Image (spheres, helix red, strand yellow):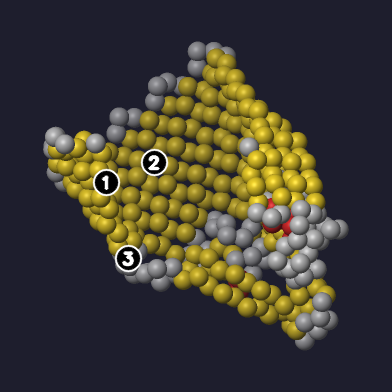
Amino acid sequence: GILYYAGVGEKLDANIYTKVNYQLTEKLNAFADVQYRFIDYNITGIDNDKRDVSQSHRFNFLNPKAGLTFQQNEKVDFYFSYAMANREPNRGDFTDAPTDAVPTSERLHDFELGNRLSFDKFSFNTNVYYMRYDNQLVLTGQINDVGSPIRTNVDKSYRLGLELVGGAKLTDWLEVQANATFSENKIIDFVEYVDDWDNWGSQITINHGNTDIAFSPNLIAAAEVIFTPFENEVIHTEAAVMYKYVGQQFIDNTSLESSSLDAFATTDIRLSLGLKQDWAKNIRLTFLTRNAFNHLYESNAWIYRYNSGGVVDQFVGLYPQAGRHYFVGLDLKF
């Protein structure tokens, strides 16, 4: 389809997709698919800063994926897959970039290995992934000719992680679900650009070595305990306690402690009552308390770093999240 952007141009995004499955043996299955994407950017006009942003870009992407699944039995299987994906810069990357620093597309190589266990009252999934990026677009502190920050390509970066997902039906009225992701998310040899207030209009560079990718915590975990105290053909009652933990993360790509967000955890509580009536398949009333323990935390922020008098300092703006708050919902199905 064609996506139009008011006053500044259009984008044509077309793709062709095909998929093949093949049973190699009784227990081993192979699959492969490939997507071809053609993107045509045509941008005309000026932006809010009166800069002429007229330009055209074309991309031809081939995104393949292939893998194997070994079905040991009906309860246990193992899998391996590889996928390559390409992504074009977004419109802002093009319109904000200086004419001599037009960004190029990103490429991702994704390797995944895992297994699934599924029993009558218990399930567990383990997945290991390695995601290698070529030319990932990130904020480095570089600015364009009117001072707006721009995303630029970094040569190498990666994400390496372990995902765990499990659930258990402990009794007829008690169920537990949980998941966790442990990861390492790195940019190789990250170079930061910092405004130099001692030489107005210029920037200094700082090589931070291998750093963490911004807003990429090394640990994310969640758990949910679901109680069903009473249920029959007419009434369904449910109470759930939901816990979420997000580890320390960084506002920018420098991995400096002064540009980090503290880890935080929140707990939500959900109560629901479901009724079946002759005139409705289901009536469900839900009461939800978010952040039940009124935890104070920030999940997002902005940062601006500068050099003045030979000292690099920074301004940080934090986005505090809501304390305890409530929702009431009514769901009708006929």
**Mark 3: few, some, or many residues within 10 Å (few <14, many ≥20)?**
few
Q: Quadrant of the C terminus?
A: top left
Amino acid found under the numbered disc labelled 2: Gly
As drawn, 38 above or below 219: above
Q: Which residue is mark 2?
A: 166
Q: Residue furthest bottom?
A: 309
As drawn, 310 above or below 54: below
User: Front-most of 298 and 221?
Assistant: 298
Find residue 171 and report its horizontal and vertical position in percent.
Answer: 21, 39
Q: Do we see residue 281 in this rendering?
A: yes
- Residue name at image x 29 percent, y 49 percent: 225
Amino acid found under the numbered disc labelled 1: Asp
Q: Which residue is mark 3?
A: 325
Q: Is residue 321 left or right of residue 7?
A: left
Find residue 10 and report its horizontal and vertical position in percent.
Answer: 70, 46
CB-based contact (under 8 Å), mark 1 and mark 2? no
Amino acid found under the numbered disc labelled 3: His
Task: Identify the image quadrant of residue 58.
Answer: top right
Q: Is residue 135 left or right of residue 218?
A: right
Q: Which residue is mark 1?
A: 331
Q: Secondary structure at mark 2?
A: strand
Q: Quadrant of the N terminus?
A: top right
- Residue name at image x 44 percent, y 53 percent: 221
User: Front-most of 208 and 233?
Assistant: 233
As drawn, 109 above or below 311: above
Q: Secondary structure at mark 3?
A: strand
Tag shown at residue 114: none
Q: Secondary structure at mark 1?
A: strand
Q: Nearer the viewer, mark 2 or mark 3?
A: 3
- Residue name at image x 21 percent, y 35 percent: 281
Q: Looking at the image, is mark 2 or mark 3 earlier in the sequence? A: 2
